[in-house]
Amino acid sequence: MITNEALQRRLDTRTKPQGSLGALETLAMRIGLALDTDTPVLRAPQMFVFAGDHGIATDGVSAFPQAVTAQMLLNYLQGGAAINVLARQHGMTLNVVDAGVATDIGEHPSLLARAVGRSTRNFRIEPAMTPEQCARALDTGKTLAKDALRQGSNALMFGEMGIGNTASASMLLHRRTGWTLEECVGRGTGLDDVGLARKRERLAAASARCPRKLAPIETIAEFGGFELAMITGALLATADEKCIAVIDGFAVSVSAMLAIEIDPRVRSRCIFSHCSAEHAHRQLLAHLDVKPLLDLGMRLGEGTGAAMAWPIIDAAARLMTEMASFESAGVDDRAS
Ligand SMILES: O=C(O)c1ccc[n+]([C@@H]2O[C@H](COP(=O)([O-])O)[C@@H](O)[C@H]2O)c1
Ligand SMILES: Cc1cc2nc[nH]c2cc1C
């Protein structure tokens, strides 16, 4: 097992003043630990965008109608969304997963059709999913991640798409942390003040419907989404593997928080790409004790923050692996 000391030694013997690569050095150490080597090489980055619909969306908790989830799914398959642009720019494979979109968009050669249901149920009225659906979503995520790793990738990246899913993610956050709904709930796709007040009120009613203490997986079944559960499942699969998992924005971070709660080993695999403009994201990242790589005011989702961080992550690994040492390059090391 590679140690922190061995990784620090590798960095400190490269041809640079010690610590001069700043946060890239911390990042390189994290990648080295996750890949268990002091010469990490990130291979075949795989971006997964999980799409799912939410029963709670019919409660007026989003600035957009539910139909947009399926419409955006088609946009991903046609190559026109922001994540398509960034995946092409950075040479990453884009895997589009139907985790449970309300309308069946039919067959498409590049769609991973893994729907667990056609939208979750409205969790203000009843549980979002059955325990069986929740287990299936977690398992499906695990299988997708394992398949990608078996096929040679060691860099998985996670994004989501689902109208209403900030309501679901905020509920999960509220119920796992005990933070108030004022702290947990934000504007998502762009609710105005009236919409934000309605969203908080609907979520307060949802929480009151099921006041008993829930275990992490029960919380996902009660208030989660199929796409969020699949991401948690995929992250759980990384715990035993030599790989990194790049986390996108608010909802993916909540899925990661749950995965870490279920299996704390997941934490060492996760790289938090950016701080989203969604209200609770900064507080959540602080709670997880992580520093995001970027802070660009983005709040799109669909993996775009993770894709933007990719060149930085890849650079950190390459610097650690490919830089010459003072000794091999014949450069004087002031310390010796
Ligand atoms: O990534 C983020 O932090 C983020 C913040 C706000 C909104 N989103 C995206 O917007 C959708 C959810 O917003 P909403 O308002 O429908 O709950 C979903 O498709 C997310 O990908 C994403
Ligand atoms: C247009 C649109 C694109 C998105 N991508 C991720 N979430 C989204 C939400 C909307 C509304």
Image (tube, grey):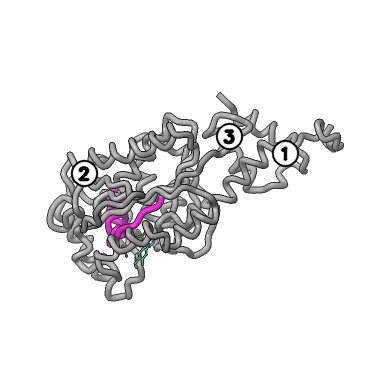
User: Where is the C terminus found, in terms of image quarters?
Assistant: top right
Which three-letter amino acid code belongs to the residue tagged 2? Lys
Which three-letter amino acid code belongs to the residue tagged 3? Gly
Q: Label 1 neighbourhood size at 10 Å, few (<14), some (14-19), many (20+)?
A: some
Q: Is mark 1 within 8 Å of ligand 1?
A: no
Q: Which one is in front in this view, the residue at disc 2 or the one at disc 3?
A: 3
Q: Is residue 296 magenta?
A: no
Which image quadrant is residue 213 in? Answer: top left
Q: Which callout, 2 or 3, points at the residue further toward the start of the chain?
A: 3
Which three-letter amino acid code belongs to the residue tagged 1? Met
Kindly report the distance in space between the C-alpha atoms of the residues bearing marks 3 and 1. Answer: 15 Å
- Helix, strand or loop at label 2? It is loop
Q: Which mark is residue 32?
A: 3
Q: Position of residue 334 (x, y in %)?
A: 85, 38
Q: Which mark is residue 213?
A: 2
**Residue sitting nearer the eye, 210 or 149:** 149
Which image quadrant is residue 194 in? Answer: bottom left
Q: Position of residue 312 (x, y in %)?
A: 59, 50
Q: Label 1 belongs to which residue?
A: 323
- Determine the residue positioned at 18% across, 40% down: 131
User: Would you say the magenta stretch is mainly helix, strand or loop?
Assistant: helix
Decide if residue 16 is on the left or right side of residue 70: right
Magenta segment: 159-177
Decide if residue 237 is on the left or right side of residue 45: left
Answer with the quadrant where ligand 2 appears in the image: bottom left
In the picture shown, does residue 23 fall above or below 164? above
**Residue sitting nearer the eye, 143 or 134:** 143
